[in-house]
Amino acid sequence: MGVNFFNFLSKKFNLDLNEKQKEAVTHKDGPVLVLASPGSGKTTVLNARIAYLILNCRINPRNILAITFSKAAARDMNDRFYSTYGNLIPNGIKFATIHSFAYKIVREYFYKNNINYDIIEGKSIKKSLLKTIYNKINSSNINDDKLEELSNAIGFVKNLMINPNDIKSFNFQIKNFEKIFKLYEIYKRENEFNKILLDFDDMLVQANNILKKDRNILNKYQRLFKYILVDEAQDTSLIQNKIIEKVALPENNLFMVCDDDQSIFRFRGADPDYLLDFRKRYKEARIIFMQQNYRSTKNIVDVSNKFIQNNFKRYPKNMFTANSRKSPIRIMRFLSDKEQINYIVNSIKKEEDLREIAILYRNNISSMRLAQRLYEENILFYMKDYYRNFFNHWVLNDILNFIRFSYDDTNVNLLESIYTKFNSYISKKELEYLKYQDKSKSVFDNLINNPEVKSFKKRNLAKFKRDFEILKTLKPVQAIRFIRNDLKYDKRLQEYCEIMGYSYDYIKNILEILEEFSVKAVTMQEYVDNLNNLRKIMHESKNNKYKNAVTLSTLHSSKGLEFKKVYMIDLIEGQIPTLESIRLSELGNMDALEEERRLWYVGMTRAKEHLELLTVEYKYNESVMPSRFIGEVAEHVEKGNSLPYRVNSIVRHKKLGLGLVKSINGEIITIDFDDKGEKNLSIDMCIKRNLLEVINYKVN
Ligand SMILES: Nc1ncnc2c1ncn2[C@@H]1O[C@H](COP(=O)(O)OP(=O)(O)OP(=O)(O)O)[C@@H](O)[C@H]1O
């Protein structure tokens, strides 16, 4: 019958599975771990196995549970399955995320036991609860970025089933995290609503406990789901695995498909080590390697495969392909962001099918300039999630409050929001004093008229009064520079970041972009309108999925996708790998650095035909280093072709100085040097001796 099934796939869908794929598809009973490389047909095989179980083994569709990582993935899988096998197989298979499956269990148990509950995830209630608790414990406010970190850390503890009393031994970068965690948990159990409040990961904790204590529920699901398939299993956490393990008993018909090299959510508690120990738990388990990549050219497959071998903690695999070679991976280095974006925009303008192009980056902030520029150029783009926090970032609020205050220096509330953010010399006591003074007068005059204020301070106050009068007259870009430099906002921020343990580089990036976006605006209103407009464009870009639009995505969100052409941008040290992962690697802990390498690998393996790795020399006028991973890739890229030298690139030769590339003819590059005139050089020699470096591209 197996043969017939494969004949059927071949005839009907023109799909000829390879031997390993067939082995996975026809595996019927008992646990199996499919270790698969990118593009090796994981989804194809998963779907084919479901069809095989139903059509050949006569398994009822209702007895099959297919678990995927995200809601979107569950929907996609459902659609992909039924668009292929819909005519033959009735509805009934359950495609679910682990959270939605856990929720089903929780709902049933709570209903049965008359327990009131409410879900607080995705509602402002969770955020405000965490904010209140943070504030209560640390006597300071938490900003949106840190709040996300806190939320992730809470998820991490639950997913890895860490005992709250052991939190100390994990190095969470959140002040008093253990206390915050414990208070949060208590409040969710005991609160004024008399309900149990549940966040996303509480569903998992609850479901796991319910399966332990309620035999009836456990038996019901064990009987119902005779066959369990898990996609992207490298991203399942310990507690998720515990749930799956329980439901799979006693037959353990468990089909786990995973690629440990694509595990990129450890920071959220994903735990691929659990799978690496699969055989320890299931001695009879079968392990199938699917290493043939059907997606990418040989150039991309070979280099990516060699690149990922630099990681130590992994199942040894060797991805290969029967696909042919096409264009080599291209590595480009630009002087600055501006040149990098110019280059991308000019390349994209020549393309017709924008759906086949993706621009990938490590950090959301990289999308801001890009989106603005693409919008100006009328190039449609698609973003599943945009960088929402940018538009209500506290830095932007500070800037606007400075400016608002310049228009109304009687407003004590506005002053309160900024007085610690410039060298105001105003104390908390003085601020309190101002609250009871004549509200129609300038706060500076009120303080100057206070006999208790020292005379040197009065001179400063008079100066600040003048400064804010100047600020009011400035155009947006001048105003932002004035706040940053003259009022010393930047300096205060730097001190603030040091105290709070925030990354100043990151905050500075935001400021630089806010400043850059203000250049064209004549009035403050225009500036704010422009920002709102960009927010709207970015927000609405999620509707462009099926239009002729370029995809912009973080590397994390690019998992599972594929494009003909992929640009990875901003590939610099400190961004990818992150500063933190570099710091840890210097202390001998390579885990975080290896996760960065996997993330990079996910990016590379999204490309079907054409892959470009772009880096810059300067970021915000400061010199930066290309990512170490560029070096690791470059080692394996075909020499000559792979080089970033192009006609019209500006290059620097170690001995001959700066020059412009006039032509490249095979192995010979002709360069017009500023001082020495035209020279013909051997590319091979230049590479071997590391003589020639690209400085910039002149874009025609
Ligand atoms: N045996 C095969 N013959 C031809 N094409 C195949 C075969 N198996 C899979 N493919 C094709 O290879 C591509 C990648 O398959 P799929 O999307 O299932 O990969 P994946 O392993 O889930 O990838 P990733 O983990 O990188 O997201 C698809 O276009 C699929 O149709």
Image (tube, rainbow, N blue to C red):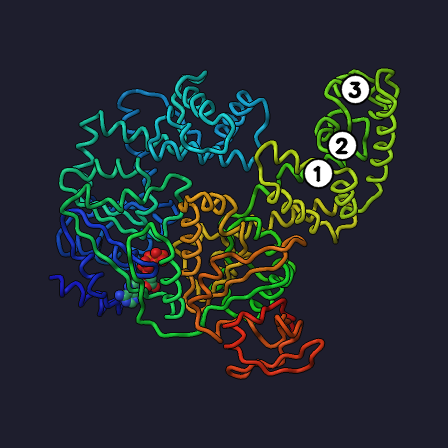
The alpha-carbon separation of the residues under discs 2 and 1 comes to 9 Å
Q: CA distance from mark 3 to mark 1?
A: 26 Å
Residue appearing at x 63%, y 75% in the figure: 648
Q: Secondary structure at mark 3?
A: helix
Quadrant in which the C terminus appears: bottom right
Q: Label 1: few (<14), some or many (≥20) within 10 Å?
A: some
Nearer-N-terminus badge (2/1): 2
- How many residues crowd mark 3 within 10 Å: few (<14), some (14–19), many (20+)? many
The residue that disc 3 covers is 434
**One can see residue 241 in this view:** yes
Residue 356 drawn at (x, y percent):
46, 64
Above or below, comparing residue 121 to residue 538 in the picture: above
* Nearer-the-camera pick, 281 or 374: 281
Left or right: 459 in relation to 356: right
Q: Nearer the viewer, mark 2 or mark 3?
A: 2
Q: Is mark 1 within 8 Å of ligand 1?
A: no
Count neighbours of disc 2 (C-alpha within 10 A) and say few if under 14, some if 14 to 19, many if 20 or more.
Answer: some
Residue 616 is situated, as x and y percent measured from the top left of the image, at 59, 60
Q: Is residue 432 left or right of residue 41?
A: right
Query: Looking at the picture, which amino acid does disc 1 mark?
Result: Lys
Locate residue 378, reporting x and y percent: 62, 62
Can you tell which mark lies on residue 423?
2
